[in-house]
Amino acid sequence: MTARDASLLGEGSSGGARRTAHIPPAFCHCLALLLICGAASVGDAQTPAPQAPPEAPIQLVYPSKPPEQTGPPLTITLADALERAQKNDPQFLAALSDQKSAHEDRLQAMYARLPQFSDTTAYLGTQGNGITPNGRYVENDGVHVYHQWAVLHQEFSANTLMGTGYKRAGAAEAVAAARAEIARRGLTVTVTRTYYALVVAQRKYATAQEALEQARRFFELTGDLERAGQAAHSDVIKAEIQYRQQEAVFSEANLGMETARLALSVLIFPTLDENFTAVDNLDTPQPLPTLGEVQDMAGRMNPDVRAAVGSLQQANFDVTGAKTAFLPVVSFDPVWGIEANCFALHCKYTAIPEAGNLPNLGYFITATLTFPVWDWGTLRSRLRQAELRQGQAQVELSAAQRRVLGGLYAAYNEALVSRANVDKLR
């Protein structure tokens, strides 16, 4: 067995001479098992039978598509992907909703400074006692009393006159707008990365497909040469191994492309739709602005700094509002309308019927002056809270400015290096 095994191991491309080698017994047993297990596929080593080309590449099986995905694939550009993502991303839509809600808060704060009008209609029915005209409830002027009032309410305080609440709501709206811009830019970064991940995966798939086809042709050519006696069986085995390896690479490239397509589909479609292709525009890179232009844009348009500035302004107005809470408040409530025993412009009062019909339509005014006298320190506690938030907002603004400046330099340097590498590769 040792000589035969050695002869099998010693056969080369030209069927060289057989040589006898001393092989350890343990290795002989292992080799015998391998030979027995592989006898069905290897066959006679002296006259190897020609092998047919392997079957077609493995195709990945996916669930059936919904009816709306059976048409031609949709072509998606980066701009289309960004536009679609802004209509479907829940975090961005939540930030946009917060911005719109903050806008409504600013409108409400503006309207709160204006006089408030209301209308009241009431009927007061009182049980009579048979003797007095006002009935059994002495605060009423008769057993039938009608109210028809037009009421105006206006409150004058330091916050109302200075517009503190309105200005604070405006600062809060600016903060919400800045956060919505942060969410939009974050979504842009995510969609852009996912989009170009799909573009790169498509390129890898195309490259792997071409390499697989070349490996298949080489494997077939090697088999033809072996059958013609111009190539050894070991060359055929090497070609088959290369083909199988390239087949695995192709399957992985296909899987990577479909995974990237799914990731982008989740971002840009309201339903899971994979029937689309991404436009490959990697050969047309965008021009890189100068550092001065980048610094100017960051100073004017950076949403993180704008949000920090708006938070500081909001904290400043909170401090102002807490201070003005110590001042008195004046409120006016003028009423114009009817309060009579009959629902008419003129009426005969049951208390003095001899006076005849008297006019009912008229007005009365209530003016109130309120002084804060004692509140167990609640107003001072609120002022201290507002001052603490103001100090924290100042610290956060300073940190945001430093963070943006440092990130700007790092990102710009990285962009320069990446652009230089891309130019060298081109």
Image (tube, rainbow, N blue to C red):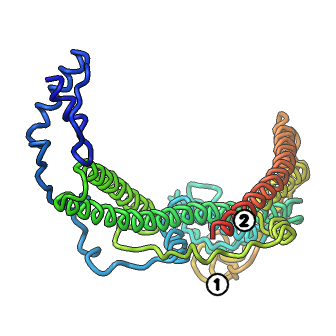
Is residue 176 in sight in this rendering? no
Is residue 174 rendered to the left or right of residue 376? Answer: left
Q: How crowded is mark 1: few (under 14 residues within 10 Å), some or many (20 or more)?
A: some
Q: Quadrant of residue 177?
A: bottom right
* Label 1 sits on residue: 345
Q: What residue type is labelled 1?
A: Leu
Is residue 298 in sight in this rendering? yes
SS of the residue at dot 2? helix
Task: Give above or below for 234 relative to 161.
Answer: above
Residue at 66% x, 76% y: name it. 338
Is residue 167 rendered to the left or right of residue 67? Answer: right
Q: Between 228 and 155, which is closer to the camera in this rendering?
A: 228
Q: What residue type is labelled 2?
A: Ala
Q: Quadrant of residue 360?
A: bottom right
* Label 2 sits on residue: 420
Q: Are marks 2 and 1 in contact (CB under 8 Å)?
A: no
Residue at 28% x, 80% y: name it. 71
Q: Where does residue 298 sit, x and y in percent of width and height?
A: 81, 65
